[in-house]
Image (tube, grey):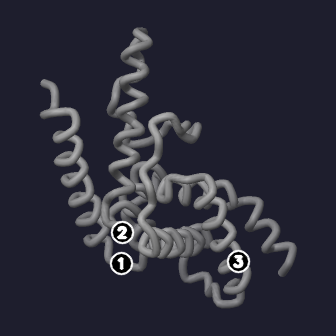
Amino acid sequence: MAESFRQILMEYQNRVYNQAFRMLGSHEDAEEATQDVFLRVHRSMGEFRGESKLSTWIYSITSNVCISRLRKKQIPTSSLDKAFDDSGDSLFDIIPSDCADPSELLENDQMKRMIRDHVRKLPPKWAMAITMYHFGDRSYEEIAEAMGIPKATVATYILRGRNQLAAELSKVIGPARA
């Protein structure tokens, strides 16, 4: 059992940390959440019945830990000086990144940060669904299973979150450019 937990830890620790960081916005909070997740995984390994994929079970625990942390305290927004993770695959792919002008690159980077900050201000369940879908490349089915909600509710959370993001961002940057 110790060896299998060690394998699980090695395989999933970076994914769990990245998911927690995307939700919580702080390296320190993400590290603490990751520790909490793997403590729960270790304690509950005997309860895992294999009815879902192991990854889904772990993301469900991650989701619950992050939502609990968000509810316990108001997470401060991130500074615009904070670095992003290196993944690059996200909702922000819609923002052009092939521009050669450094000022445009800086503007795009600031836009990405602003979007992430606004995602963190959404209701925790909406933020989790959007984060798992856009930043974690999870399907609606995987998110539904991880969050313990129907697939239709996932779609609703993502739609409402996107609408709220669009409304908030339009206040900051104005209406969409044609």
Amino acid on which the number 3 mark rests in the picture: Leu
* Residue pictured at 67% horizontal, 54% vertical: 14
Where residue 111 sits, quadrant-wise, is: top left
Amino acid on which the number 1 mark rests in the picture: Ile
Position above or below: 15 against 124: above
Position above or below: 119 against 69: above
As drawn, the label of residue 39 is 3
Give residue 31's position: percent from left, percent from top: 66, 60
Q: Is mark 2 in CB contact (under 8 Å) with mark 3?
A: no
Position above or below: 41 against 100: below
Q: Within 10 Å of the Cα at label 3, are there few (<14), some (14-19), or many (20+) other Cα atoms? A: few
Q: Earlier in the sequence, mark 2 or mark 3?
A: 3
* Residue pictured at 42% horizontal, 19% vertical: 105
Give residue 75's position: percent from left, percent from top: 45, 60
Q: Within 10 Å of the Cα at label 1, are there few (<14), some (14-19), or many (20+) other Cα atoms? A: few
Looking at the image, is mark 1 or mark 2 nearer the viewer?
Answer: 2
Amino acid on which the number 2 mark rests in the picture: Lys
Where residue 121 sits, quadrant-wise, is: bottom left
Q: Within 10 Å of the Cα at label 2, are there few (<14), some (14-19), or many (20+) other Cα atoms? A: some
Cα–Cα gap, marks 3 and 1? 24 Å
In the picture, the quarter occupied by the N terminus is: bottom right
- Residue at label 2? 125
* Residue pictured at 67% horizontal, 86% vertical: 44
Position above or below: 165 against 84: below
Q: Is mark 1 in CB contact (under 8 Å) with mark 2?
A: yes
Where residue 4 sits, quadrant-wise, is: bottom right
As drawn, the label of residue 149 is 1
Q: Please identify the residue farthest to the right as the structure is shown.
A: 3
Looking at the image, is mark 3 or mark 1 nearer the viewer?
Answer: 3
The secondary structure type at the circle numbered 1 is loop
Q: Earlier in the sequence, mark 3 or mark 1?
A: 3
